[in-house]
Amino acid sequence: MESVAVWQSVALCGFFSWIAFASYINITHKVRSLLQPWAAHHVVAGAPLILRIQKYQNSFMDALFSGLSCFVSVPFYTAFLPLLFWSGHGKLARQMTLLMAFCDYLGNCLKDVVSAPRPSCPPVRRIIATKDEEENAMEYGLPSSHTLNTVCLSGYLVYYIRSYAENISAPYEFAGFSLVCLLVVLIGLGRIYLGMHSPIDIIFGLVFGLMILLFWLNVHEYVDDFITMGQNVIYFWGALSILLLFAYPTPEFPTPSYEFHTAFDGVAFGIVAGVQQTYHQFHHEAVARIFTPRLPFPTFVGRMLVGLPTILIVKFCCKALAKWILPIIAHTLGMPVRSTSYIPMLNSSSTGKAGDGSKQRRPLHKLFFLSQDSFDIDTGIRFVQYAGLAWSVVDLVPSLFAYLNL
């Protein structure tokens, strides 16, 4: 017990030291100065290929590639993963959730470190069919998150099926592998066709995705064992989640990437906390699975009708609670805060105190904010609401299922 607590403390202290050191030497700026000119050059050089691909533009191709982009987008996975938990495939669901959060963090970090532009529009024609795509277009381009996520999640899905399903013949394995490769190619080609990415973005997304997938396949069993049977899991993961909010590079210009990271950081913490507390009740390997006599499809539909409204209500309540409590806590601790969108009144109330805050900083401010003047309270609100949503997926909602015999 003591040895576990020691290595956990050492790991967290080491991570915190790295954050402080990286901020002190401004490592993001140094790396960007090396990589950004090279990336920008390849973005410009890739424009003629994009224009050649877009010569084949038609309404069918627009709909096809826009639909595929939605199919592998973050909102799709956010809606799909709860259903995977409730279908009885708990291990697959928690592994894909954590892998998604890992991909989102590393991919968005690389985007904001390099701060490479997307293809210039015009001359490139950019097709934006959804609000999610509008937000994606505000991010930097390298690497392509859609390509990276598709490689990692579809690759892990094939690995999981191959590892846990019995008597899969070689033709079926080849068909599954071929479908994944086809999906990756179509996603990459579609991102170029839609004018959202340059070829260099797709190549980096593919290579970086394969590296992350290879790493995850070597550690996923250890991660799962730690979550389900480890010691001090919630405390360790909670501290790690908070550190990850600060272990993020500052982009050249503001983008939504950090908001996405914050949301998935909260999701990962909520999933880990909920699963760790209820593993033996709801998430062990012997739970009922969909399309079996213990969990027929009509019962699963009943789970969706109960579960989806519940998690949305929990998300709303967590957001309202965080908007009320977090500013009070920050004020009590002497932490200067601002709000980008959730609590506009905070900005007006803190404006008059900006001069005093710049002259004298309290210890907590010096420790956590480093080069920042204040902390965006929206980060905490977003983290809490998505952590609450994820916790409800794996703890509250399964409890309701048990109570309703679903």
Image (spheres, grey):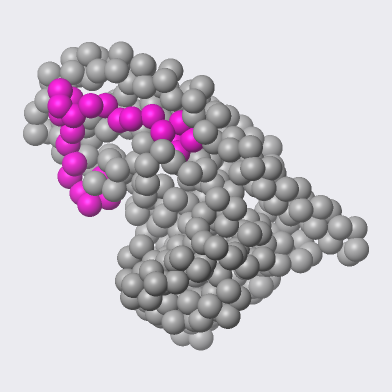
Residue shown at the point (22%, 52%) measured from the top left: 131
Q: Is 378 placed left or right of 132 in the picture?
A: right
Q: Nearer the viewer, residue 240 or 274?
A: 240
User: Where residue 212 sits: x, y (%)?
Assistant: 57, 35
In this picture, which residue range is highlighted in magenta?
110-133
User: Where residue 234 sits: x, y (%)?
Assistant: 68, 67
Q: Nearer the viewer, residue 287 or 361?
A: 361
Residue shown at the point (31%, 24%) measured from the top left: 198
User: Where residue 306 sits: x, y (%)?
Assistant: 38, 77
Residue shown at the point (50%, 58%) measured from the top left: 373
Q: Is 284 placed left or right of 109 in the picture?
A: right
Q: Nearer the viewer, residue 255 or 77?
A: 255
Which image quarter is the N terminus in? bottom right
Is-magenta flag for residue 125? yes
> Looking at the image, which residue sits at the far bottom?
403
> Looking at the image, which residue sits at the far left?
59
Q: Is residue 363 above or below residue 166?
A: below
User: Where residue 157 sits: x, y (%)?
Assistant: 51, 42
Q: Is 122 placed left or right of 181 in the picture?
A: left
Magenta stretch prevailing secondary structure: loop
Image quadrant in which you'd find residue 47: top left
